[in-house]
C-alpha cells in the first residue's frame, strides 16, 4: 500500500440514538466492522457500544475524555488476518439520548491495499484477501446493508 499521510482519507460519522420505548426489540446500529485502518471513537456518557468478545456482546465503558481506537478492516487486510477488525454494534435504551462520533482513518482512496510483505512469512502465507483499491472497498460497503464481517468475507480468497 503506497500512500502519503496527507492523502489519507478520514471520514467522520455522527450517530444520534433517541430513547426507544422497547429497546430489546430494536438495534441502534447493526453489527459491523469499520473500513479503514483505525477508528477513533467518542460518545456522550450513555453506554451503548458493544463489542463481540469470545462470542459474547460486551458493553464498552469509555474512559472519560479519551478516545477508543478500534482496528478496522484494512489492518486485517494489511496484516493478512494477523490482526482482526473489531465486530461491534450499538444498542439503544428507553431513557437517555445517546450520541457517538466515529472518525475512520483510511489510506488514500486510490491506494491499492494488499498485505505488507513484512507480515508475510517467507511467502508461506497466501494472500487472504483480494487486492483492491480502498475506494472500491468503500463502494462495496456502501452498496450493502450492515451484516457483520460480510464485506471482508466477500473479498476473502477461498480456502484461506
Ligand atoms: O454509536 C456507536 O456506538 C457505534 C457507531 C459505529 O460503530 C459507527 O459509526 O461505525
Ligand atoms: Fe462502526
Image: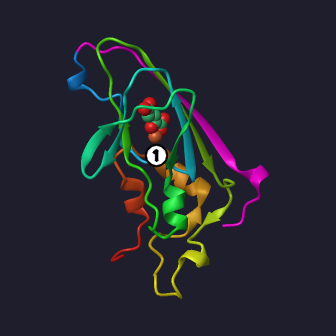
If the image is split into quadrants, where does the C terminus sit? bottom left
Q: Up-down: is 76 above or below 15?
A: below
Disc 1 crowd rating (10 Å Cα; few below 14, some 14-19, many 20+) is few
Which residue is pictured at 46% across the width and 81% down the height? 126
Task: Name the one closer to the observer, 67 or 107.
Answer: 67
Query: Secondary structure under badge 1?
Result: loop
Q: Which residue is mark 1?
A: 143
Residue at the spot 44% in from the left edge and 73% down from the top edge: 128
Pinpoint residue 7: horizontal percent, then vertical percent: 75, 52
Name the residue at 31% across, 49% down.
53
Residue 57 within the segment the image draws in magenta: no
- Give the magenta range: 1-21
- Using residue 120 as the reference point, say whether residue 108 is left or right of it: right
Quadrant of res 95: top left
Horizontally, is 69 left or right of 21 in the view?
right
- Tell me where residue 111 appears, x and y as whole percent: 67, 61
Please provide percent x and percent y for residue 143: 46, 46
Q: Is residue 156 above or below residue 53?
A: below
Q: Is residue 17 magenta?
A: yes
Amino acid at each position: 500500500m503506497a500512500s502519503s499521510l496527507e492523502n489519507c482519507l478520514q471520514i467522520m460519522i455522527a450517530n444520534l440514538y433517541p430513547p426507544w420505548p422497547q429497546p430489546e426489540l430494536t438495534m441502534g446500529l447493526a453489527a459491523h466492522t469499520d473500513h479503514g485502518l483505525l477508528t477513533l471513537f467518542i460518545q456522550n456518557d450513555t453506554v451503548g457500544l458493544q463489542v463481540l468478545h469470545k462470542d459474547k456482546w460486551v458493553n464498552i465503558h469509555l474512559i472519560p475524555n479519551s478516545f477508543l481506537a478500534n482496528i478496522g478492516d484494512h489492518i486485517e487486510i494489511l496484516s493478512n488476518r494477523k490482526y482482526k477488525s473489531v465486530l461491534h454494534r450499538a444498542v439503544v435504551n428507553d431513557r437517555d439520548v445517546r450520541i457517538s462520533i466515529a472518525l475512520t482513518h483510511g489510506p488514500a482512496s486510490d491506494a491499492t491495499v494488499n498485505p505488507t510483505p513484512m507480515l508475510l512469512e517467507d511467502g508461506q502465507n497466501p494472500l487472504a484477501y483480494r487486492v483492491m483499491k480502498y475506494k472500491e472497498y468503500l463502494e462495496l460497503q456502501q452498496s450493502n446493508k450492515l451484516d457483520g464481517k460480510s464485506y471482508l468475507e466477500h473479498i476473502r480468497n477461498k480456502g484461506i
